[in-house]
Image: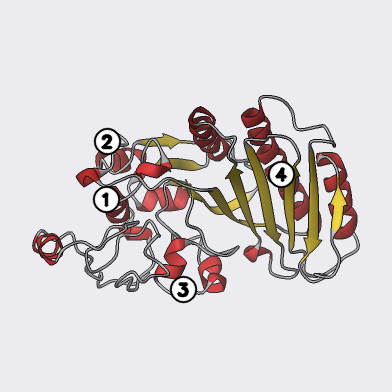
């Protein structure tokens, strides 16, 4: 399938590109190494957008704060200084390792990045990362297109030594640690993270599926045959799914097609109707709405979907 939105719906252009990662880290050192890898890869993506390495302290700097110590912010210039300060803090056994990191740019940078990490002592299964790439007014359409391809390459290069259970790329993740589907189904982020090894947390524009979840869906060949995805790429650890060529085109009937293709591994529960708070989400709602949208479908459209069996019906089995 190509990347053209169905039904002539106007494209909903993304204002940001978000990556959410759920992974398990055995100790502080593993957590620090994971942050190092994701931060390095994120800065590589920013460097590509800039057309040169992000190394000049006069052009880019970072501020970060540990979330248990909100009164203290730290400034660091350059990747190496950030990691040095971060790892020094980790070695102090602070307990809750959650922190936020924000990149600032004083030049005409087309893209900047923020990263929020949560490493919860004693509960390594709840480690998560939220990385957001923010296009600025200097970001051209060509740079934005290249950014999307770079994000796909990021998912294709996931390291084998990280125990990753979920990764998505989208523009509608919610507060750090929560996906659009979590909000639509009113799922708490804590139980959603706990079950992310066996239950897919969202049917976003781009997804990484680990081998076990991929096998439950019938493998790469079966997913390709659904015609729900623009590209399905196998990796040594699973597969990367890309629904459309561009995130802006992931809406309407394509969202519903992806949801239906991934239904066997999605959480059980209702997502009945969008509200003013949730109408921007790229979600296929139970009552026949296919988001994001700026107006609801007509009653005739909803009835046609129900008659054709494309409206959501709760499965009888439980996962």
Element under disc 2:
loop
Mark 2–mark 1 CB contact (< 8 Å)? yes
Q: Secondary structure at mark 3?
A: loop
Q: Which residue is mark 3?
A: 187
* Structural crowding at the residue carrying mark 1, measured as other residues with C-alpha within 10 Å and reported as few (<14), some (14–19) or many (≥20): some
Q: Is residue 161 visible?
A: no
C-alpha span from label 2 to label 4: 33 Å
Evaluate if marks 4 and 3 touch, with contact meaning CB atoms under 8 Å apart: no
Between residues 221 and 71, which one lies in front from this camera angle? 71
- Whole-Å distance between the Cαs marked 4 and 3? 28 Å
Q: Residues within 10 Å of mark 2 (few under 14, many from 20)?
A: some
Give the residue displayed 30% in from the left and 71% down from the top: 273
Residue that numbered label 4 is attached to:
39
Across and down, in percent, residue 93 comes to 87, 65
Q: Earlier in the sequence, mark 2 or mark 3?
A: 2
How many C-alpha atoms fall within 10 Å of the one at disc 4: few (<14), some, or many (≥20)? Answer: many
Q: Is residue 222 above or below residue 303?
A: above
According to the image, label 2 marks what residue? 1
Whether label 3 touches label 1, CB < 8 Å: no
Q: Secondary structure at mark 4?
A: helix
Q: Is residue 171 visible?
A: yes
Q: Earlier in the sequence, mark 1 or mark 4?
A: 4
Closer-to-camera residue (252/109):
109
Distance between mark 3 and mark 1 Cα atoms: 22 Å
Residue 49 as seen in the image, left or right of residue 276: right
């Amino acid at each position: 399938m190509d990347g053209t939105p169905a039904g002539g719906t106007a494209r909903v252009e993304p204002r940001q590109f978000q990556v959410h990662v759920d992974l398990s880290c055995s100790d502080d050192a593993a957590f620090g190494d994971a942050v190092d890898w994701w931060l390095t890869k994120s800065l590589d993506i920013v460097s590509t957008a800039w057309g040169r390495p992000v190394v000049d302290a006069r052009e880019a700097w970072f501020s970060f704060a540990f979330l248990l110590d909100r009164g203290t912010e730290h400034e660091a210039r350059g990747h190496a200084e950030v990691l040095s300060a971060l790892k020094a803090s980790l070695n102090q056994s602070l307990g809750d390792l959650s922190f936020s990191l924000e990149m600032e740019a004083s030049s005409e940078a087309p893209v900047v990045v923020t990263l929020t990490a949560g490493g919860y002592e004693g509960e390594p299964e709840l480690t998560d990362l939220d990385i957001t790439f923010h296009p600025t007014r200097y970001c051209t359409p060509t740079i934005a297109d290249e950014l999307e391809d770079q994000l796909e390459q990021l998912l294709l290069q996931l390291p084998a030594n990280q125990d990753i259970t979920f990764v998505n790329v989208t523009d509608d993740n919610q507060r750090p640690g929560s996906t659009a589907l979590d909000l639509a189904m009113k799922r708490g982020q804590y139980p959603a993270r706990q079950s992310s090894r066996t239950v897919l947390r969202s049917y976003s524009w781009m997804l990484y599926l680990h081998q076990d979840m991929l096998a439950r869906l019938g493998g790469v060949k079966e997913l390709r045959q659904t015609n729900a995805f623009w590209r399905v790429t196998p990796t040594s650890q699973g597969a990367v799914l890309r629904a459309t060529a561009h995130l802006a085109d992931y809406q309407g009937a394509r969202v519903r097609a992806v949801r239906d293709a991934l239904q066997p591994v999605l959480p059980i529960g209702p997502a009945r109707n969008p509200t003013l708070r949730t109408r921007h989400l790229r979600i296929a709602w139970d009552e026949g709405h296919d988001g994001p949208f700026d107006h609801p479908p007509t009653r005739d459209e909803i009835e046609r979907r129900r008659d054709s069996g494309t409206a959501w019906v709760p499965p009888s089995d439980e996962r």
